[in-house]
Image: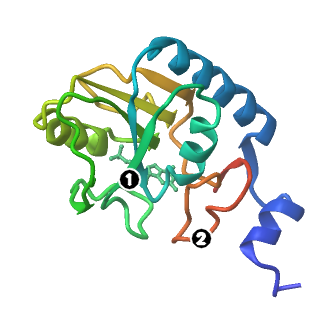
């Protein structure tokens, strides 16, 4: 059958290897939520999701955090349809909130080369937040070059191209419920 969608192949035909299951994601995100709740107790943080990839993660993460918090989004350019990083980062949609004096938590789907997160650190720290921290669901630690702390990391993964749970392959497959490796 050639008319199977890539989604069907992933979910029903085991065409791609599961790297992190739905259950593992749920459990780890619950832990991150507990940790963030404890660390920000008494504060009202603003969580900024980096589009497009973080939209699924941030939706689950904020529901695991028991605090008053705000949510905003920004969008930066990344790979396009290539499987390797282009090395250039551009702001495609900026935040609307004024973050001066606020406790800001940036929510990323994945840190690969670290270029995006470095760009965001420079850009947002210039806006004088009271604090600026990062949470990423995934990090490819072998290749990430980041000269500051990433405060909350969901999973360290090998240097492989992953899809699902917000992460795309040519703009599709973001709706896969787990993280898969695309060989
Ligand atoms: P960095 O700037 O750290 O190299 O890359 C960050 C961005 O590249 C991520 O937010 C994501 O959009 C994209 N990216 C990096 N690695 C992967 C991957 O394995 N799969 C997918 N789908 N996107 C990735």
**Quarter-wise, where is residue 64 in the image?**
top right
Horizontally, residue 102 falls left or right of residue 108, namely left
Per the image, the residue denoted by label 1 is: 73
Give the structural element (helix, strand or loop) at label 1. Answer: strand
- The residue sitting at 59% across, 47% down in the picture is 59
Q: Earlier in the sequence, mark 1 or mark 2?
A: 1
Count up the numbered dots. 2
How far across and how far down the image is residue 168, in percent? 55, 62
- The residue sitting at 21% across, 59% down in the picture is 90
How far across and how far down the image is residue 93, in percent? 28, 62
**Quarter-wise, where is residue 88 in the image?**
bottom left
Please tell me which residue lies in front, 2 or 25. 25
Is 95 drawn above or below residue 131 in the view shown? below
- The residue sitting at 59% across, 51% down in the picture is 56
Per the image, the residue denoted by label 2 is: 172
How far across and how far down the image is residue 46, in percent? 37, 36
Is 71 drawn above or below residue 12 in the view shown? above
């Amino acid at each position: 059958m050639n008319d199977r969608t890539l989604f069907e192949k992933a979910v029903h035909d085991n065409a791609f290897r599961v790297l992190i299951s739905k259950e593992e994601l749920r459990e780890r995100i619950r832990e991150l939520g507990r940790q963030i709740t404890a660390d920000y107790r008494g504060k009202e943080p603003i969580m900024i999701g980096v589009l497009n990839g973080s939209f699924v993660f941030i939706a689950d993460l904020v529901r695991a955090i028991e605090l008053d918090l705000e949510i905003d989004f920004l969008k930066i350019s990344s790979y396009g349809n290539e499987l390797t990083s282009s090395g250039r980062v551009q702001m495609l949609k900026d935040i609307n909130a004024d973050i001066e004096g606020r406790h800001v938590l940036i929510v990323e789907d994945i840190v690969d080369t670290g270029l995006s997160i470095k760009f965001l650190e420079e850009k947002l720290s210039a806006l004088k937040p009271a604090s600026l921290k990062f949470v990423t669901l995934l990090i490819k630690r072998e290749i990430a070059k980041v000269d500051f702390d990433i405060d909350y990391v969901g999973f360290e993964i090998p240097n492989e191209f992953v899809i699902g749970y917000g992460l795309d392959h040519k703009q599709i497959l973001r709706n896969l419920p787990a993280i898969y490796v695309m060989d």
